[in-house]
Image (cartoon, rainbow, N blue to C red):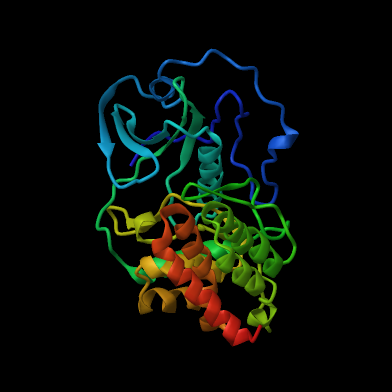
Amino acid sequence: MAVALLGSISFSSSMPSISSPSLQHPFNFNKHKPLIVAAMSDDPVREWILSEGKATKIKGISPIGGGCINRATRYDTDAGSFFVKTNRSIGPSMFEGEALSLNAMYETGSIRVPKPYKVGSLPTGGSYIIMEFIEFGASRGNQSALGRKLAEMHKAAKSEKGFGFHVDNTIGSTPQINTWMSDWVEFFAEHRLGYQLKMAREQYGDPIIYERGQRLARNLGPLFKNVVIEPCLLHGDLWSGNMTYDKNGEPVILDPACYYGHNEAEFGMSWCAGFGGDFYKAYFEVMPEQPGFEERRDLYMLYHYLNHYNLFGSGYRSSAMSIIDDYLRMLNV
C-alpha cells in the first residue's frame, strides 16, 4: 500500500486540479477555466512521483498483468509504492472519468478502493493515471464482507441530481453516457440499452437485435411496478477481475465505471462475478431486496452482454438476443 497521503486528484494541464469533490456538490468541468498549458515533461509519471508524490528515489518499476485495455505498472519508491496505468492511444478523458469514479467511492468511507492522485497526457500520445498501490492478499475472500460493504456504499452515496454522473465515462473502452435524468427507467432505456443497441446496428448492421431491443426498451415500465428506486452510487462494472481482497482480507474494488443508478444494476455482471449466497444475504441485510428483483436480473445483465457483443464480437449476441426475446414474451409486446 502506498504511504503517500495526498488530499486531491491532480489533472493534466488541460484540466484544473480539484480537491475532494463532495458528492452533494459534484465538480463541474464547465465552471472552471483550464490552467495555462505548461511544457510537458518527457516522463510526467516520474516527474510527479519525485515531486508531488514526495519520493526522492524510484527503486524499481515492474509491469503488472491482467488488463486488456491499458498497461499497468508498479513504481516502488522510498515514499511507498504507486500504481500507474497508461494507454498509448486514448487521451486523458477516460482516466479522468476513472479518477472521479474512484474518488466518489473513496469518499463514502465504505468499501476500499485505490485513491487516485494524478491524471495526465503522455508526451508521445495517450494518457496515464497514478493512484494508490494496494497490496493484494487472496483473490477470493469473505463474500459476506463484500456484500455488506458494497451495500453500505450504495446506501451512503446518493445523488440529488437524479440518475447519471458528473461526466461521461467508459465501460471497458465503450463510451458510457451519463447525462442526468430524473427517471431511472428512461435513463436505462436511453443511455444504457439504447446506446448499445445503436452501436450494434452501426457496427454490425444488425437490425434484428436493434428493433427487438428497442421494443423492449420502450416497454420496461411493468418490470418496476411497486419498486422504490433511488440514485445510488454504483461501481458500474463489477466482475471478478475488478474485485479482490487486501492483505488484511478486506474487499477491494477496482476499475470502476461509476454512475448513480438503481442499486440492482450493480449485479449486471454477476454472470462472471461469482457472487454467492453469502454475498446476497449480507447485501440485502443493508439494502433490502425489492419486489421483482429476480425478474429484473437478466435486464441488467443485458446491458453488459450488449457491451460485450460490441466490444468482442458475435459470441455474445445469442445471450443478448435470448434475454431480449424472453422479456418480449414475458411482457407480451
User: Can residue 250 be seen from the camera position used here?
Assistant: yes
Residue 332 in the image, given as x and y percentages of width and height: 64, 87
Percent position (x, y) of residue 257?
Answer: 52, 52
Residue 219 pos. (x, y %): 68, 77
Direction top: furthest residue: 39
Number of numbered discs overlaid on the protein picture: 0
Q: Quadrant of the N terminus?
A: top left
Question: In this rendering, is residue 274 above or below 289?
Answer: above
Q: Quadrant of residue 264?
A: bottom right
* Residue 4: image location, x then y, percent: 40, 33
Relative to 331, is 70 on the left or the right?
A: left
- Residue in the foreground of this view, choosing between 257 and 298: 298
Q: Pick the quarter of the image with the C terminus.
A: bottom right
Residue 232 can be seen, yes or no: no
- The residue nearer to you, when weighing 53 against 305, is 305
Name which quarter of the figure residue 188 lies in: bottom right
166 sits left or right of 311 in the view: right
Q: Is residue 274 left or right of residue 233?
A: left
Q: Residue at x 55, y 61 (%)?
A: 206
Q: Which is nearer the eye, 302 or 313?
A: 313
